[in-house]
Image (tube, grey):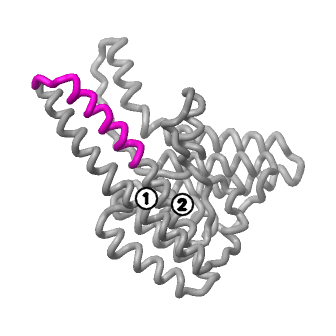
Amino acid sequence: MVFSSLIFLCIFMPVVFAAYYLCPVKARNLLLLFASLIFYAWGEPVYILIMVFSTIFNYITGILVSMYRDSFRLEKAKIILIISIIGNIGILFFFKYTDFFIQIINLVSQKEIPLLSVALPVGISFYTFQTMSYVIDVYRGDTQVQKNIINFAMYVCMFPQLIAGPVVRYGQIAEQIQSRKLSDKNTALGLQRFITGLGKKVIFANQAGELWNEIYNCISQGQNTSLLLAWTGAAAYTFQIYFDFSGYSDMAIGMGQMLGFHFPENFNYPYISESITEFWRRWHIS
C-alpha cells in the first residue's frame, strides 16, 4: 500500500484517522500500532515477521543494555550493544547484499552458486536504522529505555514514516510517544502538507516517470535517439526522483503532524547544492 493509492486515500487513511481522533487518548498508540501492521501487511504479509522480529529483538536488547548500564556493568552492556548492531546489520545485509556477493564469488571463482533471489522487504532500511539508533542512544545515555512494548513497537512500525522515512530517532519523539495533544491547527497544517506531497507525487513525479520510461524503452530497444531526447530523458528521471522523494517526505511529515507528532525535515532543495557533501545533507537530512 502506497500513500498515493486509492485504497489508502479513500479507505485506509479516512478510517484510521477517524478512529484515531475518536478513540480514548490512552488507546491511540495501540490503535496506531494495529493500523501500521495492517498497512505493512497489505503488501508484505510475509515480511511483517521480519519487522516484528526486529522490534522484539531491539526491545529486549534495549532493556538489557539499560539494565547493565544502570548497574555499572558497562562491559556487559557493550556486549549486548555489539550483539544488537551485528544482528541489525546482519538482517539488512542478508536482504540487500547476499545475491550481490554470490555474483562476485561466482565471477571470481567461476562457480555457479545459485542466487537466493530474496526480495527486499519494504522499509527495512528505515526501521533497522531506527531501532539500531535507539539501542545505541540507550547505551550512551542519550535517551531513556522504553519498557512499554506497545509504545516501542508503535515507534518502530508507525506507518507515516515506515516506507520512505524520515528516520526518526527515538529521543526526538520520546515525549510525544508518551503524551501528545491534537489541535485543529496542527491537523489543518498536516493535511495541507500531505496534500502538497501528494500533488508532487501524482502530478509531477508520476508524469516525469512515465516520460522517462518511454524514452528509456526507446534507448534499450536500440532505436535512434537524438541528443535532445536523451537529455529530456535525463531531466525527466531527475525530476521523477526529486518529486517522488520530496512528495513522500511531505506526506509522511504531514500525517505525523495530524497524529500529533513532529517529525524532522528530510528534504531541503538538494539540487541547489554546491558540493556532493551539501547535496547529501540536503537530500536525506534524517
Q: Position of residue 244 (x, y in %)?
A: 39, 49
Say whether residue 45 is visible.
no
Residue shown at 59% from the left, 37% from the top? 281
Residue shown at 55% from the left, 86% from the top? 23
Residue shown at 56% from the left, 27% from the top? 275
Q: Position of residue 252 (x, y in %)?
A: 50, 60
Left or right side of 111 for 255: right
Marked residue nearer the N-terminal end (2 or 1): 1
The amino acid sitting under disc 1 is: Gly
Q: What kind of secondary structure does the magenta stretch mostly adopt?
A: helix
Name the image quarter holding the N terminus. Answer: bottom left
- Mark 2 → mark 1, Cα distance in angstroms: 9 Å
Q: Is residue 277 magenta?
A: no
Q: Is residue 184 above or below residue 249?
A: below
Circle 2 or circle 1, nearest the eye: 1
Q: Is residue 237 magenta?
A: yes
**Nearest the camera: 72 or 10?**
10
- Tag 2–tag 1 contact (CB < 8 Å): yes
**Nearest the camera: 253 or 188?**
188
Q: Is residue 89 above or below residue 202?
A: above
| Secondary structure category for the residue under label 2 | helix
According to the image, label 1 marks what residue?
Answer: 197
**Nearest the camera: 265 or 143?**
265
Magenta range is: 223-243
State the mark number for residue 253.
Answer: 2
Say whether residue 258 is visible.
yes
The amino acid sitting under disc 2 is: Ile
Q: Position of residue 173 (x, y in %)?
A: 67, 62
